[in-house]
Image (cartoon, rainbow, N blue to C red):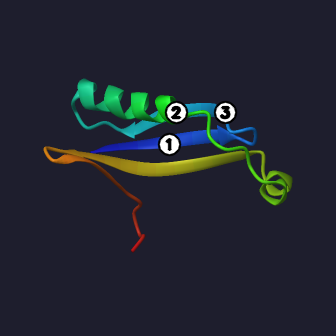
Amino acid sequence: DVRMMVSINADGSLRELEVLQSSGHSILDDAARRIVRQASPFEPFDERMAKQQDVLEIIRTWSFQRRGLSGSVPGAG
């Protein structure tokens, strides 16, 4: 598992990407970073959201498993 914080600017560009908790394997940490970078830029915030905030921070745990990749948000579900 790799726990990361992703910060996105209102225009959808990637502001910051930080590994908060490493998987212990640099190849997996790097893969999670690469996935986020390849997914960017993201959709710009809609007008209402852009008026409320200029940056969105998302903390997510990426879980690499033999059958593929899954993600979870603590406390969800």
Q: Secondary structure at mark 2?
A: strand
What residue lies at 83% left-to-right and 60% top-to-bottom? 48
The residue nearer to you, when weighing 59 against 68, is 68
Judge from the rendering whether residue 46 lies leftward or rightward of residue 62; answer left or right.
Answer: right
Residue 66 in which image quadrant? top left
Quarter placement of the N terminus: top left
Residue 11 in which image quadrant? top right
In 3D space, how far apart are the residues under numbered discs 2 and 1 (Cα atoms)? 6 Å
Mark 1 or 3 closer to N-term?
Answer: 1
Q: Residue 22: where, in percent of width, then height?
A: 31, 36
What residue lies at 48% left-to-right and 29% top-to-bottom? 38
Residue 50, placed above or below residue 35 = below
Do labels 2 and 1 touch, CB within 8 Å?
A: yes
User: Number of marks in the image?
Assistant: 3
Please give the residue where the numbered disc 2 appears in the rendered image: 17
What residue lies at 56% left-to-right and 33% top-to-bottom? 40
In 3D space, how far apart are the residues under numbered discs 1 and 3 (Cα atoms)? 14 Å
